[in-house]
Amino acid sequence: MEAFTSTEKYLAALEARAALPTGFRVSTVSLTFRPVERDVAQPLAMNLSLILLDRETPEFAAVYTANRFPGVPVLLGRERLARDGIRGVLVNNRIANVCAPSGRGDAERLLAALGRETGSPADAFLPASTGIIGWRLPVAEMEAALPGLVRGARGGSFAPVAHAIMTTDRFPKLRSRTVGFGRIVGIAKGAGMIEPRLGTMLCFLCTDVGVGREELRTALAWAADRTLNRISIDGDQSTSDMAMLLSSRAKGPADPEAFREALRQVLAELAEDIVRNGEGTSHVIRVTVSGAPDDEAAAGAGKAVVNSPLVKTAVCGNDPNVGRLASAIGDWAGGAAPWFDAASVTVRLGGVEVLAGGAFRLDTAKEERLSAYLRGAAFDPAARGFPAHDRCVDIEVSLNGGPGTAVVLGSDLSAEYVRENADYRS
Amino acid sequence: MEAFTSTEKYLAALEARAALPTGFRVSTVSLTFRPVERDVAQPLAMNLSLILLDRETPEFAAVYTANRFPGVPVLLGRERLARDGIRGVLVNNRIANVCAPSGRGDAERLLAALGRETGSPADAFLPASTGIIGWRLPVAEMEAALPGLVRGARGGSFAPVAHAIMTTDRFPKLRSRTVGFGRIVGIAKGAGMIEPRLGTMLCFLCTDVGVGREELRTALAWAADRTLNRISIDGDQSTSDMAMLLSSRAKGPADPEAFREALRQVLAELAEDIVRNGEGTSHVIRVTVSGAPDDEAAAGAGKAVVNSPLVKTAVCGNDPNVGRLASAIGDWAGGAAPWFDAASVTVRLGGVEVLAGGAFRLDTAKEERLSAYLRGAAFDPAARGFPAHDRCVDIEVSLNGGPGTAVVLGSDLSAEYVRENADYRS
């Protein structure tokens, strides 16, 4: 278990794992602009970030949101997956470029300018944006910032980009693993749509391990499905969620199984960081489901638990409310699991059996111990900055219906979440 | 539009529609008990209510929760649907009789005693319970209360039962319609699982219109599917949700279409009462979806909107957040609607077009008007007693994909909801 006593110590731990793989440079700049959509007293700030490969690579992969109001970066990025190679990624926060007039033209113009600035084709970069939906990008201001952005690109640490892509994130998120002769380093921001008027989970992974394009894409889809797709803050998948994996091939190949597993570990840690960072989150809930017919069914049961507002509010209140757990599982099974047998289900909270054989296993003393366990996993949902600890509330659900398993992470639901998402008018 | 300025005026309006159909008597008593599961300083109170037909009827219908941890009343009630006739319903609040040891034996013993007391068979009554999950019913205290309960049964008003079945409901819910030579009168409590540690939607409908058993059951399933199944407070379906419809046949038959429509109207009004009564609710959201391939798909889109925590919190904050509406619809379509075309979708809020042709239709002045509209539909989520008004936040979604339509009702998500569901330890 990690516990941090200051933002400085958290950032030092993050910096220690932040070294960029060989063949990558990064850069960030800040700019200000006035949106055309709204009279604002002060200009708004935007961070623009560049992930630049020393040379074009054919080894790149991306997974995108299934949301059917996708942002322009999702639409353009999907098309550019067919290119022979790409040179890097341009990322902005503040405006998501979704449902805005001329959004596609704006993005293409910017990326073409970046191509000229780097001596690359007009379509050699992938776009990524996060922020307000419906507004236009400030293309003139962004284009003016590109020369400085390209000039500033450096190897060394990936951490500046982890900072620059934040919107209302509490802390930057960066994780890494060594594999073969190289490394995988990933950064992320957001968590689905957790934020007031801003939304988007963005995840960028760089590696210098050489992995063929097809295997790279298979590995990313496989690992994302087991990590990023098994977290839930509020059940919403934003218009702009994406995860990208770029390889510079600078350090040669590695064992494919080892690469996949290292990638899964990086993504699992980033996924947990995202949940812990969720606005208004005061507990991270980890549901481990076993005994489902397959892994997908197990994930469905786990998501039903972490998406139940009643389970989420009970955990927030440090209430070991077994009735709400049983009801959430039973509600899911009523729709999705004809094979379900209530009498065969066992539920544990913090390792303690609380439901078995169709009946509660509770007494006053056990409830008090469980409430103390929940209090011990809590943190202040209004706190900013570093995560105070990495404890989770562990819920284990044994369904006794087959070999399928899944681990699903979610957040509790606090009054702070509502305040941050409701008491807000931009 | 109805607006009430006092609890007295609300109750007077409710009483004016409360006359029991011919052939029914009702009764309620209060009792106190000490639960075996918990040391309590004061005994707990429970209301016990009886709906008694003058004679057994074969014309009865019920729909039950699909939750796979169902309560004993659900399990017993489903079995008794096969009986030739029933004499009435025994309802208690405070304890739901779900996942409790010996729960089935307890309920059977009580209902058999009620049978003796009324000169009916041991299995002539349907049970209904709401309240804490996992605890045992206080059978001795409940059995001792039965003689007084039966003696007190009277025709006249259904309102005492609407009061007695409440748990943390803000106000009693009772609606009626005349049809043919008779009436349909219904009462309800709760809303899915909206309440701290208590859950359950219970709905009891009495009519003196003679309707054959098969048609009665078809009509109830049809009407519930279009009303009670199209509301959502928090997406949870409790372990004990049920709706029952009993006919005394005292006033002869009516046109079947007219009966169905009257039943649908009673249930639609009760469903709206339930949402308006939701704990922590400060706006009722009414989503009208058109242009889906079928009604079921339309209902799916509507539920995606009213279940999105981000839409719910935005409405709570009087924020006309079109981005969250678009994202919720797009997220639903990504999973459920391959036929979906974002460019064909039109969204209106309070009758005002806010999204069309894949782009926002907003400016600062329009947003301010919409925010004022949302403020006008708000009420105090912490207020107790009567509903201050019956206004809704109207969201219309035109999908342009077919003839399917649906109206879905939901609540917003306020900090008060979280307080009532989290800051609670029984």
Image: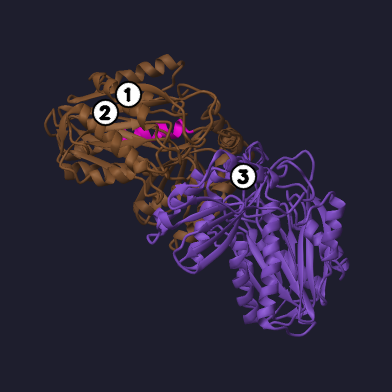
Chain colours: A brown, B purple
Mark-to-mark CA distance, 1 and 3? 36 Å
Which mark sits nearer the N-terminus, 1 or 2? 2
Amino acid, disc 3: Leu
Residue A297 belongs to magenta span: no
Mark 3 — residue?
A: B370
Magenta: main secondary structure:
helix
Mark 1 — residue?
A: A145
Q: Residue A68: where, in percent of width, then height? A: 40, 51
Left or right, A323 with reference to A79 = right
Which residue is situated farthest in the left direction here?
A252
Pointer 2 local density, CA inside 10 Å: few below 14, some 14–19, many at least 20:
many
Q: Residue B241: where, in percent of width, then height? A: 63, 60
Pointer 3 local density, CA inside 10 Å: few below 14, some 14–19, many at least 20:
many
- Name the secondary structure under disc 3: helix
Q: Nearer the viewer, residue B339 or B347?
A: B347
Amino acid, disc 2: Ile
Can residue A327 be seen here? The reply is no
Mark 2 — residue?
A: A51
Pointer 1 local density, CA inside 10 Å: few below 14, some 14–19, many at least 20:
some
Left or right, B142 with reference to B370 = right
Establish whether labels 1 and 3 are both on one chain: no
Mark-to-mark CA distance, 3 and 2? 41 Å
Pointer 3 with pointer 2, Cβ within 8 A: no
Quarter residue A85 falls in? top left
Task: For the C terminus of chain A, give its image quadrant.
Answer: top right
Mark 2, chain letter?
Answer: A
The region drawn magenta spans A266-278
Amino acid, disc 1: Ala
